[in-house]
Image (cartoon, rainbow, N blue to C red):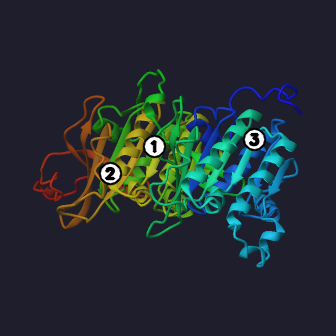
């Protein structure tokens, strides 16, 4: 077939078959270009390459997988583990000629690598001419590098392949397992784009994978690291959340909690599209207050998402039921979505992506319980703050009310939070223990509210079978902000006893 007789190449960009990756690449790959996908063994290069070819097959494009490191049978078995069939994809298994495997032939004055590289290149180009593919995956460059035995010869071979594929109008992914010498950028300068896959091994928990577009000529792309996973069905990429890309117009209506005294403390409630931080030591009732806000949102007809890091969902349902909150009924009605989150198994990118998917499906209130668990999914506190900044900004701009819980270390005295996000939250509710009349009691106060006025008082609250009951403002306190509230008023009952 002559060049003039060749069919017209497909139009538009070449989708990779991975929605998140297409988002990162600004809708996909520019056609008729050569791209480098590099990463250590096990980072998912082969899986990504197969998805690229399968997406082309779905669009009616011819695909060619050239393998130098795996057999065709191994490739088909790997694809079958994801539920894929490679029937519509040509697999070219490039193997050395039989005479080069003969020990007698290796005693020739010519190096076997000289013959083998030329033979491998010739066989590959013949297959390409025969198949005329629209998409090609070459796995892997490390084999060509070993055969070339020199950077100059290696570069020339890559350039030869690049120009040959360009003449045919093919979009090519070259996979490389990064076995080259450190600093060797031979293919980086030749490729139109470079995608790096990385695998991180935390001290505890599952491995974390992320990718980064290191180069993409003439095209704006989403920079930075993006988390991804490999599961049944292939690679899933979670693009880094950029809150500035998401703006919506809405009215900041005031939302109540269903507890009149708490609403009075908050100056009438919290505003729609703001974030509220509940801060205090363990056991003070932070989760219960957040769930009261969630129940009030359900009564308003909103859908609520509660991401639970620290507590078993079944235990939470039983405990809330005993306090007058029927979360099970809300869940059955579809008004409340309870997500059990395993911090050791989920990446921050995947978590933000899951919340975004729920918000786009209609969720208007989000509870994160707690940031202590969320921090466990992060490599460091500085990254947690950056992730939370983007996530809260995104939720605020989508008219979503967010309730964050942070448990401080210790019970009384100089308590420290594992991460300081008080400056990110629009409202901060401070919960404390205090001692009065020979009993341990609980107090709540508002220390910050950006969207409006609030009481500067401290109110006692109780948790019993009737749920949360908040009392009137108490004035005879000292030492609340330093973590040791002391009641110096008259002896007696501070809050009226409710029914047993």
Q: Which residue is mark 1?
A: 224
Question: Which of the image's four quarters has the C terminus?
Answer: bottom left
**View extreme (bottom): residue:** 103
Across and down, in percent, residue 370 comes to 41, 55
The CA span between labels 3 and 1 is 27 Å
Query: Badge 3, how many Cα within 10 Å: few under 14, some, many 20+?
Result: many
> Is 341 located above or below residue 173 in the figure?
below
Q: Residue furthest front?
A: 109
* 32 and 239: which is toward the camera: 32
Give whichever of 195, 272 is nearer the camera: 195
From the viewer's perspective, is 407 left or right of 494?
A: right
Q: Position of residue 309 (x, y in %)?
A: 48, 58
423 over 80 or under it: above or below = above
Residue plotted at (82% across, 54% down) = 91
Q: Nearer the viewer, mark 2 or mark 3?
A: 3
What residue is shown with label 2? Answer: 382
Which of discs 3 and 1 lies nearer the camera? The answer is: 3
Q: Earlier in the sequence, mark 3 or mark 1?
A: 3
Residue 323: image location, x then y, percent: 47, 56
């Amino acid at each position: 077939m002559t060049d003039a007789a060749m069919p017209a190449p497909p139009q538009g960009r070449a989708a990779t078959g991975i929605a998140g990756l297409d988002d990162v690449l600004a809708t996909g790959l520019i056609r008729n270009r050569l791209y480098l996908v590099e990463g250590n063994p096990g980072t998912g290069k082969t899986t990504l390459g197969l998805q690229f070819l399968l997406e082309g097959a779905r669009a009616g494009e011819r695909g060619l997988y050239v393998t130098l490191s795996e057999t065709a049978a191994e490739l088909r078995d790997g694809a079958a583990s994801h539920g894929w069939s490679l029937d519509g994809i040509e697999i070219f298994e490039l193997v050395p000629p039989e005479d080069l495997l003969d020990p007698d032939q290796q005693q020739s004055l010519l190096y076997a690598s000289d013959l083998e590289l030329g033979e491998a290149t010739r066989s590959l180009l013949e297959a390409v001419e025969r198949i005329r593919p629209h998409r090609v995956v070459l796995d892997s460059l490390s084999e060509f590098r070993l055969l070339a035995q020199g950077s100059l010869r290696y570069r020339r071979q890559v350039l030869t392949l690049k120009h040959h594929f360009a003449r045919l109008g093919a979009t090519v992914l070259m996979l490389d397992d990064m076995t080259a010498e450190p600093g060797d950028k031979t293919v980086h300068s030749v490729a139109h784009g470079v995608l790096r896959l990385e695998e991180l091994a935390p001290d505890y928990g599952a491995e974390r994978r992320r990718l980064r577009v290191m180069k993409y000529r003439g095209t704006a792309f989403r920079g930075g690291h993006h988390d991804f996973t490999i599961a049944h069905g292939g690679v899933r990429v979670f693009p880094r959340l950029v809150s500035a890309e998401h703006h919506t117009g809405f009215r900041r209506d005031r939302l109540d909690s269903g507890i009149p005294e708490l609403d009075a403390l908050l100056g009438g409630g919290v505003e729609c599209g703001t974030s509220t931080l509940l801060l205090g030591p363990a056991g003070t009732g932070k989760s219960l207050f957040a769930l009261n806000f969630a129940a009030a949102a359900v009564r308003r007809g909103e859908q609520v998402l509660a991401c639970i890091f620290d507590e078993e969902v079944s235990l939470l349902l039983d405990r809330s039921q005993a306090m007058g909150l029927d979360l099970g009924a809300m869940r059955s009605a579809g008004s409340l979505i309870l997500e059990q989150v395993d911090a050791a198994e989920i990446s921050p990118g995947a978590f933000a992506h899951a919340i975004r998917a729920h918000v786009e499906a209609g969720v208007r209130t989000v509870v994160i319980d707690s940031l202590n668990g969320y921090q466990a999914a992060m490599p460091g506190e500085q990254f947690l703050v950056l992730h939370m900044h983007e996530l809260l900004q995104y939720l605020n701009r989508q008219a979503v009310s967010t309730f964050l819980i942070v448990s401080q270390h210790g019970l009384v005295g100089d308590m420290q939070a594992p991460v300081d996000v008080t400056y990110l939250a629009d409202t901060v509710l401070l919960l404390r223990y205090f001692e009065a009349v020979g009993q341990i009691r609980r107090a709540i106060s508002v220390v910050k509210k950006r969207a409006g006025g609030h009481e500067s008082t401290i109110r006692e609250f109780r948790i019993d079978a009737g749920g949360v009951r908040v009392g009137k403002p108490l004035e005879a306190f000292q030492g609340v902000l330093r973590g040791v509230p002391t009641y110096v008023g008259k002896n007696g009952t501070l809050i009226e006893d409710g029914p047993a």
